[in-house]
Every structure is written in C-alpha cells, then in structure tokens.
Image (cartoon, helix red, strand yellow):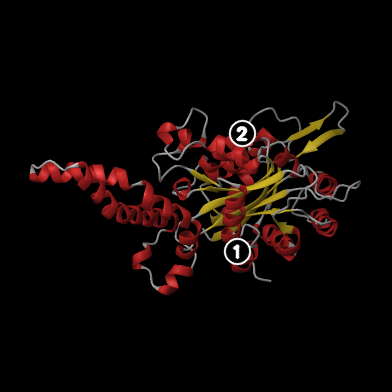
Amino acid sequence: MAMELAFALINPYSIAKSRTGGIIGRFMSRTGLEIVAARMFGPSAELVARYSEQIREDAEIEQPARHLLAEYVQRAYAPDPKTGRRRRVLMLLFEGDDAVERIRRVAGPIRPNADAGETVRDTFGDYIVGDDGQVRYIEPAVLVGVTPRRAASVLRLWTEYSERDGGVVAGAVDVNDHPDQQRTLVLIKPDNFKFPSSRPGNIIDLFSRSGLRIVGAKIHRMSVAEAEEFYGPVRTLLRTKLKEMVGERAARAVSKDLGIEIPTDLQTRLGEELGPHYGDQQFYQIIHFMTGYRANACTPEERVIPGKERCLALVYAGVDAVAKIRGILGPTDPSKAEPGQVRREFGQDVMINAAHASDSPENAAREMKIVKVEKDMIRFWVDKYYPA
C-alpha cells in the first residue's frame, strides 16, 4: 500500500472537556501510524465558512451526515459571536500505509444513539436522535478525511490559514484571561514514541487534572544545537552537584583496586577534578537521548538539522500553570515520585522519565523560544504529500 498523510481535527468541545489525551491515544495505538505534526488552530470566520462549504459540497460524504457536519462546523468552529474570541481546534497529522482509511476506521462513523466504545466517536462523541427521527444533539468529537482526495482537499485549505490562524492560541474563548495567567512548556519525551502507543495520550490525560488549557502543540525534532541551548542550565548544575557523589565513588573504586584507604581531603579533590567531567558525560547523554545524535561526533551541518528523535511539545496556559504542571509531573527520579504522577506512572530513570516541564515562568519563556511551538510544520507535510 502507498504511504499517505492523514489528518484528524480534534473539535473545540472535545478539547474543552479535556478529551484530547484519550483521542490522541486511540489514534496512535489503534492505527499504528506515526504522528508527524500537531498544530493548534483558532479558526477565523473565513476559514470556518470555507471549510463548512467544502463539506456541504463533498459528494463523498453521505447525506444526512454531510449537512449535519457542515452545520456543526459553522456553529462549533466559528469565533464566539459575542466576544469574537476564537475556538481551539487541534490538527494532528499521521503518516503511514493506507493512513487515511486507518484514521477513518478508528474515528468511526457518525451513527445515532451509539452506546459502545468501539470507535473514537462512540466513546467521545454524541449523536442523539429522538423517537420522532429528529436530531436532538450532535458532537462528532473529531473530523477526519474519508478518502485521500478528501484529505488532500481539507489539508490544502487549512494550510492556507495555518500561519495566520494557527500557533499558540492563548486568547481562545475558553482560556482563562486572568491577569495572573502563566504559560508553561511540556515536552513528552522520545521514549514515548519508540513505537505507536497510547502513552503520549495517557500522559496528557494525567496533566488534564490541572484544569489548565492546551493552547499550543507541535511535534518537534530537537537539533543538537537546540538541545545544548535548552539543557544548558542543566549542564552547569550537573558539573557542580555531582562532585560529592563522584568523589565518593572514585575513592571506593581506588580503595578496592589498590587496597589503600583514601583520606577525606583526597576524596574531595577527586570529586573536584572528576565531577565536572562526569557531569559533562551525563549532559551529553541527555543530548543523545533527545536528538539521536552524539554531539561530539556531529558535523557542523548535523548540529543544526532536526534530530532523529521526536517529542510532543505542548503549551499549557492558566493561573499558576508552572507549579500545577510540575506537581503532576513529579520529581526527576521516578522512584521518588508519588502514585498518579507522570514520572511514577511512565518514567524509568532520571533520564528516561517520560516528560519535561518548565520549572519557572522565566524558564518557560526561554524554552518556548527555543522549541518555537508557534512555528508552522503543517505546510511542510502537506506540500510533501499533497502539493498544489
């Protein structure tokens, strides 16, 4: 089968009800496809009108679903009529063999009065029809392409608006505009993307109890240069905080190998000499883990290209966002985390610990500047598969 690019749009209601993680987990684990891009949109009235009309005129969508979906988009995706503030719509792109059909099957049909959890729409959506046959309520949870032709058409349309309507949508109608609002960055790390699974979605589910809003999303492949800048403060910390531990371990090793007692002052000097070297080694292991490249073996060209590994970058917004997310994340060492914290549930050790979160508003701003969550990667993938 041919490689394809498929999309799923997570609807504003699904996002507002914190169903994002569950939906992402379903698509990743049940399709086996690679998630290659993610972008938050705040659709303008113009994009909504064009998308709604596109659905209405698409003969590949059967009636009455065509009419219902067109009306739904016009109502649920449009900016709030009272305030003009936009809704949040999350676009996900998936790559793989027969990707469009796989995404369509997992999304499921729009069927009335479904009472099972077989598909995404069965679980997270609603389509209520009364005894008189009249539609009482419809919430399809997600919108997807039903054929490659349809997927191409939708993606080309949304790509036109990706720069101006997409990015970090902090002013959305359901995002608290409190003056003390903070933004913080979360990276769901590469260990969660070794193979398609529900892990990234499950981690997002845990963060949802913060009550914060996801206002930005990006699949990011960190370059070596970015990783060195991103983790630069960690390097300084590692070079100093590990001196005592390195001194103790070095003294024990020398004592065991040579059979001599190492005095305390010499142990301290061993830590002073070897600690920074050990800290650097740990730092470059982090760089390798995040990028897939060994920094000391990289060519100048390799330092600046996207890495071999990927992570999902998310921007959360709300009051006290940094502390709330850090509290759910847990300590660096997963063995010291509490039940229900992300690193206790999904972490392995101090490096492979599931996720990163900014530890201060200042670091959040610095880290978001490096990762550039607002940068559009949708066009790259759409132009690759569906050039105009």
Instruction: Please give the label number shown on residue 94.
Output: none
Which residue, given by chain and number where applicable, does mark 2 sit on?
118
> Do we see residue 46 in this rendering?
yes
Query: Label 1 neighbourhood size at 10 Å, few (<14), some (14-19), many (20+)?
Result: some
Image quadrant where one finds the C terminus: bottom right
> Do we see residue 63 in this rendering?
no
In this rendering, the count of numbered labels is: 2
Q: Position of residue 94 (x, y in %)?
A: 58, 54
As helix, strand or loop, the secondary structure at mark 1 comes to helix
Q: Which is closer to the viewer, label 1 or label 2?
A: 1
**Residue 141 lies in quadrant:** top right
Q: Is residue 227 above or below residue 238?
A: below
**Residue 149 lies in quadrant:** bottom right
Residue in the foreground of this view, choosing between 371 and 64: 371
Instruction: Please give the label number shown on residue 381.
Output: 1
Residue, x 38% and y 46% (percent of image)?
241
As helix, strand or loop, the secondary structure at mark 2 comes to loop
Residue type (three-letter) at the residue carrying disc 1: Trp
Which tag, 1 or 2, sits closer to the chain's start? 2
Residue farthest to the top?
131
Q: Position of residue 206 (x, y in %)?
A: 58, 35
Q: Position of residue 362 (x, y in %)?
A: 60, 52
Q: Is residue 57 above or below residue 118?
A: below
Residue type (three-letter) at the residue carrying disc 2: Glu
